[in-house]
Amino acid sequence: MDKDTRPGDRQGWVITDPDLAQRMEAHRKERKAIRRRQTAARITALVAAFLLGLAVGRYTRPPAQADEPEPPPATSTPAATVPATSEPTAADLWSDDRSRIDTPLLDHADLEPETQWAIFDLCGQDTDLFCATMAIAYHESRFTPDLIGDDGKSVGMMQINARWHTGRMEVLGVTDLTDPEQCAAVAIDYLKELEDITGATPDDPALYMAYNMGPSGARKALEAGRETTPYSEAVLATYRSYKEEMEWAADED
């Protein structure tokens, strides 16, 4: 994470293998079919429960007394105002059914589904932050949890230099940077800090410049007229691909 670029970081995320593309499409169709069956099963269960409730109510309701006075007419009351709801985000659609813990959030991220979900939770189920974290992990290490880089200075999937994050690691309780979730926790906390410092969002190359070069290095580069770097361009492209994949998966539901 101390260097501006690394081998492979200049390449965008492009699928060129037709067999892989075909397998991906088959996998997507299979996932879609599974979700449809799950949805159908839930709807069937809800309908059955509703009908059972009607039947129980019909046969257990006590008979009305013949001489029972009619109740007074109900007074009109203003209808309760239902607050307007916004369109659900991809995070909302992904997180409403934890039974999908075995389904990866990103097919093209080489991490176990449970690890992806754990990192998603560490991001507060913020889709943008999650996709940014995963994009950085791809370009820093290709999701290799025990990678040692920068002459032994940077460790783990997110290539964290413990020298600069000792206090952060203590606060977060992180003791093993080769653990993907612990390593991601440090990077996520750092990304939030960089967002506050730089005002950059995950859709801004300046955020990835700051992660790669440090906030002061990024500021100097921006002041010198360098609005982006090969590293930040590559990470940003992967971030957008990951975000599109999550939004596509949410729309499929």
Image: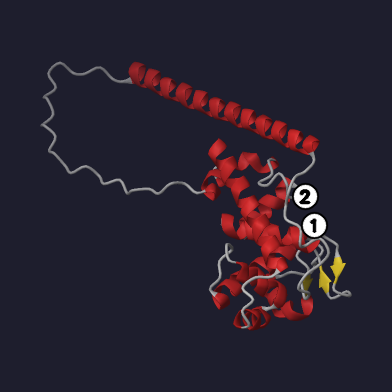
Horizontal and vertical percent for residue 94? 57, 45
Q: Which part of the image, by quadrant, shows the N terminus? A: bottom right
Q: Mark 1 points at which residue?
A: 142
Q: Do the residues labelled 2 and 1 touch (CB within 8 Å)?
A: yes
Q: Could you tell which of marks 2 and 1 lies nearer the N-terminus?
A: 2
Q: Which part of the image, by quadrant, shows the C terminus? A: top right
* Amino acid type at image mark 2: Asp
Q: In which quarter of the image is residue 36?
A: top right
Q: In this view, does 164 lie above or below 104?
A: below
Q: In which quarter of the image is residue 64?
A: top left
Label 1: few (<14), some (14–19) or many (≥20) C-alpha neighbours in 10 Å? some
Position of residue 167 in the picture relative to residue 40 (left or right)? right
- Residue at the spot x=68%, y=65% of the render? 185
Please count the marks in the image.
2
- Residue at the spot x=12%, y=25% of the render? 70
Q: Nearer the viewer, residue 165 or 76?
A: 165
Position of residue 152 in the picture relative to residue 22 (left or right)? right
Label 2: few (<14), some (14–19) or many (≥20) C-alpha neighbours in 10 Å? some
Q: Nearer the viewer, residue 222 or 182?
A: 222
* Amino acid type at image mark 1: Arg
The numbered mark at residue 110 is 2
Visible in this render: residue 125?
no
